[in-house]
Image (cartoon, grey):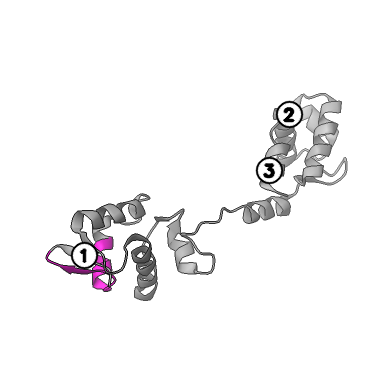
Amino acid sequence: MTVHTLAGALADSGRRQIFAAIVLGAASAAAVAERTGLPARVVLTGVRRLTDAGLVTGADGALAADESSLRAAARDSRPADDAEPADDPVLRTFLRAGVLVGLPAQRGRRRSLLAHIAERSFEPETRYPERAVDDALKPWCAAGGSDHATLRRYLIDEQLLTREHGIYQRP
């Protein structure tokens, strides 16, 4: 099931009511019709459409939400994000849509995350005034996972940025 299939199946308010009734325990078309107040013909059509979409399993008398299909759709529809490489668990854990949600306590993990931020924010051998460094780091902190001054300090501590007379540079 794709996200588009899911959205299409639930686009109709009647089908949403039918699905909700099934999720809440209505196991037959008659029970769904009773709970929703919808005509039997509408319920049968809605159940068929929800079954075809993979949201509902079972024949009349044993209707149930297909939870495994819903989980698979949620898992398969995650947007790809260049800032969160799927192969790096540290970045996957501490970044959401390119925004920092926290800092790792372990130094090695923190350094890996900081190296990612430095590579994405600063060109090597380019000189930056402090204000430009702050402006480059603030978007990473939009979710409140840290603040730009803390990031700047950690980048210097880990020697991912150097500072001399208020001018910063990525080595």
Q: Residue 127's x, y, as percent?
A: 22, 64
Tell whether position 55 is magenta: no
Q: CA distance from mark 2 to mark 1?
A: 60 Å
Q: CA distance from mark 3 to mark 1?
A: 47 Å
Q: Which residue in the structure is indicated by mark 3?
A: 4
Stretch of the chain drawn in magenta: 151-165
Circle 3: residue type: His
What's the mark number on residue 14?
2
Q: Residue 101's x, y, as percent?
A: 40, 56
Q: Do the residues under discs 2 and 1 have CB atoms within 8 angstroms?
A: no
Residue sitting farthest toward the bottom: 108
In terms of sequence position, does the residue under pointer 2 or pointer 1 come before the other?
2
Regarding mark 1 in the picture, which secondary structure is present there?
Answer: strand
What's the mark number on residue 168?
1
Circle 1: residue type: Tyr
The label nearer to you, 3 versus 2, is 3
